[in-house]
Structure formats: structure tokens, C-alpha cells
Amino acid sequence: MADSSKMRNGLVKRGDTWSYVIRVPDPATGKTKPKWVGGFPNQRAAKEARDAARHQVHRGQYAEPSKLTVGDWLQQWLNTRTNQRPNTLSSYSDLVRLHVMPYPIAHVRLQALTPTMLSEHWRKVSTSGSRAGGPLSPRTVRYAHSIVRKAVNDAVGEHLQAPPMWSKVQLPRQAAAGSEPEAWGPDDLRAFLAATSGTRLWPLWVLMSHTGIRRGEALALRWEDVDVESGDVRVARGVSDVGKGPTYDLPKNSEARTVHAPQLVRSALREWRKAQAEDQLRAGVAWVGSQPESGALVFTMPDGRPVAPSYASKAFARAVKDSGAPALTLHGLRHTAATLLLRDGASVHLVARMLGHKDPSITLQVYSHAIPGDSNALADQLERIIGAAC
């Protein structure tokens, strides 16, 4: 028991840490009893935890203290995410491993976690959290925080009765310019496609830049999904290469869709199919494309193996460098397709459908910078409408 003469409103310092005491219900007697909770690094953290505990007691939601740490819970939580897409789970695991586990916050008791602790943690990560020890982008910090938030919220009911007050967590601000996805203009795209024409994966570059489909969706296409005469391409699944070998699953939004490929794409795919048949003749018995999962794939390696997403990204990076085009990721071809269409006045709803966004508001949020028009134009438009009505 702490010396009550040193206690201030239920808070007391014990050695190098702070503790608090509150009165909690005793299920056996129906009366209240004192409950001590310690291990807080400073008085402010102890006060925040005490206030949260008092609020839980008042609402009848108090949870018995547990020694489970933030790091331990995150590992448990990741291990139970069996319904997560492989790429997404790999991204979650990497962010936790790099930006949570090496830091003191991983050793904080889950029930002692406070907004102040999280704010300080993300401040440190934002200034020195990159692999090279330098600053980490606000976007990555916010993504990592969203994962921690999901995990902690999922602990409610099992290890927590209420999560921290997330609105009080201070995160680095996202720069306005950084919110715009990287994309090429029409001249850059034309120059790149001209410079890389005739290279092996050129049909993939053409397909992605002219339909906006994702890398994994393009590499999961089967010939039965493609009608090179009408141009209809059915996007019914995606592929990731997390772990051993390719993993096929539903598209990112779990819904199939059909996109239309223009003439350039259709011609490229016709030529690709001929080249693929020649690959099979040359490979002979070494051709592995007859395997059930990969036999009908559109994009294959010379021996019939699927083209791995990571391989495609590296091949694109080399092609961009060799062509002299501005730096861009393979996913940037998708952004390029959407940006060029919206800048040319295409319907947001139609572009959202092409991209596979469930809600056009997602498209608006990501590509609002690409939509033409300004307040002056809107004012002129209203004046014309009202003037005509008068």
C-alpha cells in the first residue's frame, strides 16, 4: 500500500513509476473495494488511465487489470486474421514489426495504453522510423496507427472494456501534395509505351494503363476472362505472391466486374497469345502451364509459370529507368488511367466502376485533384442557369 500522505486524488509515485487507485465493485459482496493499478511512466499517463477506469466503473464496464502488453496483443491479433487477404496481412505484419515492436510502447500493458503514449510514440516514429533511421512519411504513420487502432478496438470485450480516446491521439499532418497519387501525363505515357514496345511485358503495361485494373487483377486473368474481339475483360480475381507461390483470391472489393479494353490493348493481347504459344512449343515437356491453376493464365513466364506480382513490379521499374520516363510505380499506371480520364471530364461514377471502387466517394477522395473546374466556372454556370430561368 502506498503512503497516503503522498497520494493526490488517487495518484501516487512508486519508485520510478506512477500508480492509481480507484474503488471497484466486488461481485461477491456487492460492495466496492480499492483497486491499485501501476506501471505508468509519468503522472499524466496514470491520470488518463485512472479517469478512463473511473468512467468504465461508472458505466458498469470495468475490466480486471491484465499484464497483457500492446506487443503481445498485436501478435495475437495478427495470428487470428485468417480471413485477411495475404497482401493486406503481410502489410499489417510489416508495419507492426517495423514501427511498433522495436519501441517501448510494445511493452506497455494494453490496459495502460493512453492517447498521450500513442501521440508520443508516433511523434518518435515520424522523425526516425524509416529503415535508414530518418523521417517516416505521415501517410505511413497514419496507416500504422490505423492498424493499432483496429487491433486495440478488437480487444474490447476480451481484454478491454473501452479503447483509448482516439480523438485525442495526435498524428503528423498529411501534406496536401502528398495526398495526390503519382501518375503520368499523356505525353509521358505515350513516350514510355513507345520506348518499351516489343519488350516481353509490354502488353501488361498497355493493359493496366488503358483499363486501370490492379497489378494482381491483371496477372490473375485467364484467357477465358478476355474477349479480344469485343474488348470485354472480366476481372474476377486477384493474385498475390506473399509466402510460397501465388495465391489467388477475389478482387480487392470481393466483387467481379467487367472493363472494356480499347483496340490497342486487344491488338497487344492477340500478339501476346501468339508469343505465348511459341513459348509453349519451345519449352516442350518443360512447359508448366498445363497445371490446373496456371494453365489458362494470360500472363506467364517463358516456361509457363505465372508472372509473380513482385517480378512484374521490378520489371516495370527497370523499364521505366531504361526508357528515361519519370519515376513511377507499376500501381501508378492505374492512377494514370484514372487521372487522365477524370481530367478529360469522364464521369466519376463510371471511373469508379472501372477501378472497382464500391463507392464513388472513394474515387472522389483519391482523385479530387484531377477533376477539372473551379469556383469561378461554377459561378458562371449558375448565372447562366438562373439568367435563363428569369
Image (tube, rainbow, N blue to C red):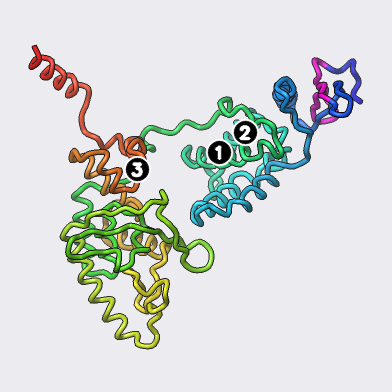
Q: Is residue 10 magenta?
A: yes
The residue carrying mark 2 is: 118
Q: Determine which residue is flagged by label 1.
A: 145
Badge 2 marks a residue whose secondary structure is helix
Q: Residue 241's x, y, as percent?
A: 47, 63
Which label's residue is closer to the chain start, 2 or 1?
A: 2
**Residue 290 percent coordinates (x, y):** 38, 79
Q: Quadrant of residue 43?
A: top right
Q: Magenta stretch mostly in which secondary structure? A: strand
> Mark 3 = which residue?
181
Q: Up-down: is 74 above or below 51?
A: below
Q: Which residue occupies 14% across, 20% down?
A: 380
Q: Quadrant of the N terminus?
A: top right
Which of marks 3 and 1 precedes in the sequence?
A: 1
Magenta region, residue range? 8-25
- Residue placed most toward the observer, 180 or 92: 92
- Residue 198 lies, in percent from the top left, at 22, 69
